[in-house]
Amino acid sequence: MKDAIAEQRAKTNRQLENLRERHLANNDEVEAQRQYITELNRHLTIINGQLQAAERRIGEVIAKSMERAQKVM
């Protein structure tokens, strides 16, 4: 009986250790994904700023073109 209990305890301990290892691996994967998303967000923020600057510049060019067109008329 004691052998069966000891065997079950050893099996349970192995299962717990396997769960701990999987949990740690999952934590590492989640952290890697979090860092990847943070880096993507940084790049998207930069690109968004560049797009906004381009939109402003396009607006300025259109405004100047309209002014010139008004002068020609």
Image (spheres, rainbow, N blue to C red):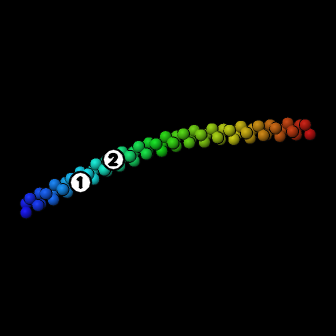
Describe residue 60's horizontal placement relative to residue 37 as left or right. right
Query: Residue at point 56% right, 42% down?
Result: 44
* Number of numbered discs overlaid on the protein picture: 2
Q: Where residue 14 sits: x, y (%)?
A: 21, 53
Describe residue 41's horizontal placement relative to residue 53 as left or right. left
The relative height of residue 14 versus residue 50 in the rendered view (above or below) is: below
- Frontmost residue, 60 versus 33: 33
Residue position marked by numbered label 1 in the rendering: 16
**Which of the two discs, 1 and 2, labels the residue nearer the N terminus?**
1
Residue position marked by numbered label 2 in the rendering: 25
Callout 1–callout 2 Cβ contact below 8 Å: no
Q: Where residue 11 sits: x, y (%)?
A: 18, 56
Q: Specify few, some or many for label 1: CA neighbours under 10 Å numbering under 14, 14-19, or 20 or more.
A: few
Secondary element type, mark 1:
helix
Query: Residue at point 82% right, 38% down?
Result: 65
Q: Which amino acid does the dot numbered 1 rest on?
A: Leu
Q: Specify few, some or many for label 2: CA neighbours under 10 Å numbering under 14, 14-19, or 20 or more.
A: few
Query: Residue at point 38% right, 46% down?
Result: 29
**Which residue in the rendered view is the most extreme toward the left?**
2
Q: Where residue 32 sits: x, y (%)?
A: 41, 43
Q: Where residue 49 sits: x, y (%)?
A: 61, 39
Query: Residue at point 13% right, 57% down?
Result: 7
**Which residue in the rendered view is the most extreme toward the bottom?**
1
- Alpha carbon distance from label 1 to label 2: 14 Å
Residue 30, disc? none
Which corner quadrant of the image does residue 8 belong to? bottom left
Describe residue 65's horizontal placement relative to residue 72 as left or right. left
Quadrant, the C terminus: top right
Q: Which amino acid does the dot numbered 2 rest on?
A: Ala
Describe residue 7's horizontal placement relative to residue 16 as left or right. left
